[in-house]
Image (cartoon, helix red, strand yellow):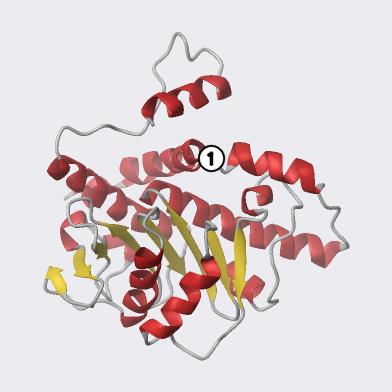
Amino acid sequence: MSNTLEQQAAKMTIGSDKFKLIMPPKFNTLNEQRTYEKQRLAAGFRVFAMYGFDEGLAGHITLRDCIEPDTFWVNPVGMHFAHIKASNLIRVDHTGNIIEGSTPINNAAFAIHSRIHMARPDVNAVAHAHTRYGRAFSALGELLKPISQDACVFYENHSVFDVFSGVVADSEEGDMIAKSLADHCAVILQNHGLITAGSSVDAAVANFVLLDSCCQSQLLAQAAGEPKLISHEVALHTKQANGSELVTWGNFQPMYQVVAAQDNSFLD
């Protein structure tokens, strides 16, 4: 896998034969990996705070545990994203038992995320929030259109979950959301918000930021007139390049650098 990623990176950069590329890390032990990934999850919340993706008790990012993969880490309910540290994270199993931590978690977080983690073994992280542009776009009940290079990342790679029955409170609706997500990287919850999924926290969070931005762009474009669409073939080709595992991981790295420079207390 790492060689493949390095080959992808070399094709996308100039001078990669002379300078060390930033690549996903390798670990000597699972405990080392767990510590690193919890810190990335905490950093993901700081990124959400930086973009203003916080609305009271709403919003959550989860991370499948690398040692016990039938459990996942999630934020404690009621703690602002800007204050979350790795040590604050709560680990819960797929039946709702808290394994590590002493703070309650958001019931909707469990109902949605547990079912996605169960349905998608390839997904290690899931991000969800009620953002301004995500809420506005979700009210349209439609897919993103391929109107830009960035929007092509989600071309035939997201869906719309068109059922809204209030706050998600049970696993049955979580199963429905997971089914709607299918094998895509994102789902728009009609009249609700956005969800992204990825093989890492880095990918899930970066794609969430991008999805929200693409929702804003389409709202602006549609308000001005009828957007010109990118062709099916070009959109698919662009998705292949910009929606790859390496690129989605890489898109998070500049965001991480910013939050780490501002306040790296999330590492604790």
Q: SS at mark 1?
A: loop
| In the depicted structure, whether residue 189 falls above or below residue 244 | below
Quadrant into which the N terminus falls:
top left
| Residue 236 place in picture, x, y as percent | 70, 44
- Residue sitting farthest toward the bottom: 165
Amino acid at circle 1: Ser
Q: Quadrant of residue 241?
A: top right
| Residue 231 place in picture, x, y as percent | 82, 47
Q: How many marks?
A: 1
- Residue 233 left/right relative to 267: right
**Residue 130 visible in the displayed image:** no
Q: Residue at x 52, y 56 (%)?
A: 185
The residue carrying pointer 1 sits among few (fewer than 14), some (14 to 19) or many (20 or more) residues within 10 Å by Cα, namely some
Q: Quadrant of residue 180?
A: bottom right
**Tag 1 residue:** 244
Q: Residue at x 40, y 42 (%)?
A: 258
Question: Depth check: 244 or 140 in front?
Answer: 244
- Residue 261 left/right relative to 206: left
| In the depicted structure, whether residue 190 falls above or below residue 14 | below
| In the depicted structure, whether residue 30 falls above or below residue 78 | above
Q: Residue at x 30, y 33 (%)?
A: 25
| Residue 121 place in picture, x, y as percent | 36, 57
